[in-house]
Image (spheres, coloured by chain):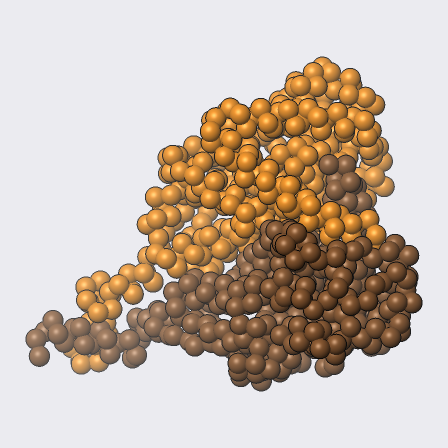
Chain colours: A orange, B brown
Amino acid sequence: MKRRDFIKKAGVSGLAVGSVAAPMIARADTKLKWKMVTTWPKNFPVLGTGANLLAETITEMSNGRIDVKVYGAGELVPAFEVFDAVSRGTAELGHGAAYYWKGKIEEAQFFSTVPFGMNSQEMTAWLYHGGGMQLWEKTYEPFGVLPAAGGNTTVQMAGWFNKEINSINDLNGLKMRIPGLGGEVLKRAGGTPVNLPGGELFTSLKTGAIDATEWIGPYNDLAFGFYKAAKYYYYPGWHEPGTALETIINKKAFEALGKDLQSIVRNACKMVNQDMTSEFTAKNNAALETLVNKHNVDLRKLPDDVLAKLKVLSEDVVTELAGKNPAAKEIYNSYDKFRKQVMAWHDISEKIYYNVR
Amino acid sequence: MKRRDFIKKAGVSGLAVGSVAAPMIARADTKLKWKMVTTWPKNFPVLGTGANLLAETITEMSNGRIDVKVYGAGELVPAFEVFDAVSRGTAELGHGAAYYWKGKIEEAQFFSTVPFGMNSQEMTAWLYHGGGMQLWEKTYEPFGVLPAAGGNTTVQMAGWFNKEINSINDLNGLKMRIPGLGGEVLKRAGGTPVNLPGGELFTSLKTGAIDATEWIGPYNDLAFGFYKAAKYYYYPGWHEPGTALETIINKKAFEALGKDLQSIVRNACKMVNQDMTSEFTAKNNAALETLVNKHNVDLRKLPDDVLAKLKVLSEDVVTELAGKNPAAKEIYNSYDKFRKQVMAWHDISEKIYYNVR
């Protein structure tokens, strides 16, 4: 063996055993295969493509040390089993929304959205600079799950209806897909809230299994084709004024990472949170124009007195949830204190600016 | 030499010459020292601490392969020489705002803020999902500089005045620190706009060198102590409804990075854009309460007819800038088209929600 060849071979075998170079090389050499399960149809606009972007960004920033594969709803686990799958480590990552787990953790709903509560700008600020994230982490801690904000839908539309809404009484007997606290409010108004994954909504509406559904906003609603199954499209979405979607991470898998990879995962989540929020903001108007001008959608505003009554019912629902257990109370107190403060500030900044510009 | 020692040494020297292991090891071993120059006082709330966070995040995600050191205004170069310093490679990174370079690149002002234009949510959406960033990159391309959104101030306050503003005539003869297009509008109203770095504002206001200054919002304005130097604090900030700050990157330094480090730098910028925006949103109200309740600040709203007249002047200024050269026209067209679309959408979502909640 020539000396030069020996050096090469020694260099290579040193990858595994050399005491000086090993730690560095072990890091560079480690290739983790991670799975991300989602509550959305694979590649669905913004929701699914945002999850894809998160996966790609983690892989790219880590130079392939974490290779993330994304699964749509039902591919590896059903939509509403995403949380459990991440909790038990079947998947290292999940993408969905906290109110989908209300049957398991009722107070988690505060981390998605609150009827008549904060909008996207306020919600993200509460989570990352108002103590919200620490409470969210505490809430998921017993399940071995770490949460991150995973994109914000911004103010949603009130939804698609096959019945005109002229008074609060028109919600009586209405069977509507509406998740989270908004669903509880509908129940108080005499309706029947149903929770279904997005992929099942069109058929349910078309067959009359439900009378109405909300989903997100024009861009996503156009993608599902609801205009072919409902008569009226109502605004504004009082029930979901700025829904934080979520990225969830299996805590053991996260803690096994080095500090750099932990930082990459956490910051990729934050980046995608902003990116998805921007995409919703950018794309809703063109989709709305298509719905109205091309598909002749009947766009309607909910009457002011209906909104006013829904607001009263919402306050009941939210404060009742806050009283259910000490954890819910702690989260509500933090949310409500921040909400009042940011609203006072926005009264003389964002809100007044919208009205004078 | 024992065989084991030789392997170790060969392994180490193999870092430099081994043809198999070298590329991986060279990457892991490279330690770049980067400088970030800023237009802000070192560690100034949100602006300076946001720049620090960006530096730390790049260092952390890269596992120290890029070690970033932050310089406050005047430490390495004066505030308004940040762009030139990054352009010539004196520093690899800079943090400031695009309208500070209007003497060099007039049309760059569109990438910071436009009077009566888009707010923070809309501006970020235009930049990252509406074509704005591509135009920004094209604008800085001749200078060898890559831009990124670097935090958004959200709707600013109209500023600190030593003179009551009861009609548009009260702006006549007013000497005010107000950068960018807002300054041009003040000039049309008969005032004298001055551009000064933040660190010089308090003294200028206190000594009467200027009659008024805007800066950002309560949290930052409290930090500079303007309440000790001015009589009235006006809202809303018509002139800066959502100012995009900027992170700039020396293009050659960026292109010398591997794909993973490029992705780390770009995504750290995006993360910090959201984080700073959230911090402004979270902290302004408590600071406003301190200003009003503790320091007895006289908080005033600009009269509606003053705002209406400023709006007319703003339209003149903005369309005039758009006509100055083909580059300005191209940017304006993109900005204005996006603005109209997103305003139509926000009329039935964000704006109406602020008014009904």
Residue B214, position in %: x, y?
A: 73, 67
A189 or A194, which is in the foreground?
A: A189
Identify whether B180 is placed above or below A113: below
Q: Quadrant of residue B292?
A: bottom right
Q: Where on the picture, by quarter, is residue B178?
A: bottom right
Q: Residue at x 68, y 63 (%)?
A: B227
- Examine the rendering and report whether any part of residue A111 can be seen: no
Residue A350 higher or lower than B229, as above or below: above
Q: Along the line of sight, which residue is nearer the eye, A293 or B302?
A: B302
Query: Which percent across, then down, holds residue B160?
Result: 74, 65
Residue A115: x %, y % from top left: 66, 32
Q: Where is the N terminus of chain B found, in terms of image quarters?
A: bottom left
Q: In the rendered view, would you say A298 is above or below B32?
A: above
In depth, the one of A75 and B42 nearer the eye is B42
Q: Position of residue A37 (x, y in %)?
A: 48, 39
| Residue A243 visible to an observer of this rendering | yes
Residue at image point 34% right, 48% down:
A255
Q: Residue at x 71, y 58 (%)?
A: B297
Q: Is residue B40 left or right of residue A133?
A: right
Which residue is drawn at the image coordinates 51% and 76% (left, top)?
B71
